[in-house]
Image (cartoon, helix red, strand yellow):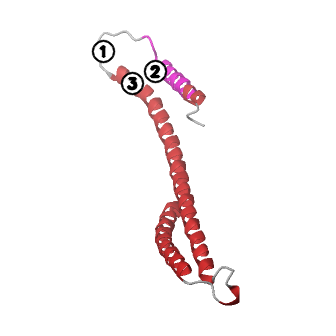
Amino acid sequence: MLENLLDTAFQFKRVRSTLASSLFHQKEVMAVIARNIPGMGPWAGEKSVFDALADETAYLHETAGNTREGLLSLIDARINAVSYEMNRAMRVIAVFSALVLIPTLIGQTLGTNILGARFTLYLWEVTAWTIISMLVVGWIFYRLGWLR
């Protein structure tokens, strides 16, 4: 349902725009008719039918304007929600990239041919330090709130 929310809102906005312009025209026509036709019969002191229609179309035109504001608010709310969700996804991708960078750099450094270099570390020590550094970086991102 939420996938089609923006499509439906834009369709309503287009229909509302057409309706508002038609109501504006009808409001003007009713106002002209109400001014040119005087009250008749025993109800001469009361509002004529055309005055009532002019008031009603003015009210409907105003309601269509308020509907426009509501639709724009709805569209903005949906776009902001999607942007927030996208922001969360981008944070997770950034954390994942930072965590993958650590073993990549260690593997790249240890994978080069360094003749005569004396490394006193064993493979299990390199693996342990890699995992510890990845956990520390992951904890830092967790404390920053990027993994919540």
Q: Nearer the viewer, residue 33 or 114?
A: 33
Report the front residue among 35 and 17: 35
**Marks 2 and 3: which is nearer the front?**
3
At x 46%, y 35%, the residue is: 94
Q: Secondary structure at mark 1?
A: loop
Q: Nearer the viewer, mark 1 or mark 3?
A: 3
Query: Separation of disc 1 and disc 2 at Cα?
Result: 16 Å
Q: Which residue is mark 2?
A: 123
Q: Earlier in the sequence, mark 1 or mark 2?
A: 1
As drawn, 146 above or below 42: above
Q: Residue at x 60, y 73 (%)?
A: 55
Residue furthest to the right in view is 42
Q: Earlier in the sequence, mark 2 or mark 3?
A: 3
Judged from the image, the secondary structure of the residue bearing numbered disc 2 is helix
Q: Position of residue 74 (x, y in %)?
A: 56, 57
Quadrant where the image shows the C terminus: top right
Q: Report the span colored magenta.
A: 120-139
Dot 1 alpha-carbon crowd within 10 angstroms: few under 14, some 14 to 19, many 20 or more: few
For the point 69% across and 80% down, which residue is it? 46
- Checking the image for residue 114, the label placed there is 1
Q: Which mark is residue 105?
A: 3
